[in-house]
Image (spheres, coloured by chain):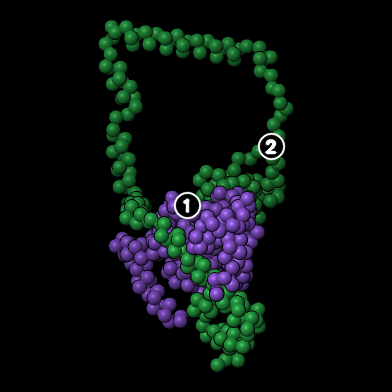
Chain colours: A green, B purple
Amino acid sequence: MTDTKLSHEEVSLVLPWYLNGTLEGEELDAVKSHIAECSKCAHEAEELTFIKSVVAESNEVVNESLEIPVPEMQSSVMDRIGEFEDPRASESSTAAYEDTESLWDKVLRFFDGFQLVSPVPAGVATILIIQLMLIIVLASKLYTGDEEQYVVLSGPAETAVERGPVIILSFVDTATDREITETLNEIDGRIIDGPKPGGLYVVELAGESVTTEDLDKIIAELKTEKDIINKVFKGRSR
Amino acid sequence: MEKKRNEANAPDLELLEKIAGGDREAFKVLYEKYVRQIFSYVFKLTGDSKMTEEITNDVMFDVWKGAKSFQGRSAVLTWIFGIAHNKTMNEFRKKSPEPVDPEEFSRVANPDDSVEEIVTKQDRSKRMKSAMDELTPEHRSVLELTFYQGISYQEIADVMDCPVNTVKTRMYYAKEKLKEALTKYGISPEDALQ
């Protein structure tokens, strides 16, 4: 037996892991000797045993209704691995796709089906040409017309004020919250928008004094953080 | 205990070494060994089978890509759970761009349902599941990893990438919230213990 003593609060916090059998060493001995004498802990242990049974029963409900399509999922991930390891295979499949008939070929083939003397395509072509000419005439009139035609009813649009330059980046899926926060702290940046499609975030760098050179340096540094950053590039300055 | 865990981890380490060398058969073995466990864990957090399928396969694809960089600081399964947990939480983040405090955020069942209605609607196990569903993903996760997956608090801290003390306090709040939810669904610890 060990001399390590734990307070009731300390024991109470680790009781769940005493019950799941993962405590070990001196901590296990200390918990054992405490609960042998503590009626409060005995009651808490009973409550936790009940919680454990709730977790188990609710899991049974979920597992009963759960249908996992393992073969399909496995086949899909193996395909992904195949593409990842041998990108040439996927390139050749793309090339095969490109070899198939293009849209323009299809259009030409469609018109091949008509006789030149046939009145139907000739009529359709005439209508299309007239419509096209009308569009060109109207468009040119609009551009050369009086300026009063274009009256802006609203005032100038207000845009969000940004204090520093902006970069756009995305994080790798395995990046943890802590890593992301630390990385942002290192560059003195904060997320002001996102996630956008592709998991992209807009990050504002604090301070107006960040020069273009500083910005390039920051981006270059971020690019080396391959475990955390997926993509990074300059945002459009406003 | 630790010896037992190391023994259990040894075959996984062997598989991972082979995977790092590009052995697809070894990957298939590891995939079949853990895919159900990971799927079930993610599903309990998301409740969406389509999303769960995608996340699970992303996790396993990351296992393939990351096998070379695995440093053995935790058991292989803990490492895989860690990837699964991160990906799932990232999905939640994508869905809610505003920062959410997991301790504060909790989904509330239809407040119009009286206890009697809820009780008569569902049987005991389903009511327990409904009570679990009211917890935040973080709270469900700590209960699931402790009582269903049976892993230590140090390993849970690795999975959730947080300090050990956070795991312990999270467990405390998870337990309290679950007790409240169980009472709402007509199940009290006292009844169950009788």
Mark identifier at residue A41: none
Quarter of the image with the N terminus of chain A in it? bottom right
Q: Amino acid at mark 1?
A: Asp
Residue B36 in the image: x percent, y percent? 39, 61
Q: Which mark is residue B48?
A: 1
Indicate left or right for A84 with B191 as reference: left
Residue shown at the point (58%, 74%) measured from the top left: A47
Q: Quadrant of residue B182?
A: bottom right
Output the chain of dot 1: B
Tell me if mark 1 has few (under 14), some (14-19) or many (20+) residues whose alpha carbon lies within 10 angstroms of its own: few
Question: Would you name the residue on which mark 2 appears?
Answer: A159
Give the position of the C terminus of chain A as an image quadrant.
top right
Look at the picture and state if A223 lies above or below B189.
Answer: above
Secondary element at tag 2: loop
Nearer to us in this view, A170 or A2: A2
| Residue B117 rendering spot, x and y as whole percentages | 57, 54
Relative to residue A188, is residue A114 drawn left or right?
left
- Of A137 and B47, nearer the camera is B47
> Image point 28% across, 34% down: which residue?
A99
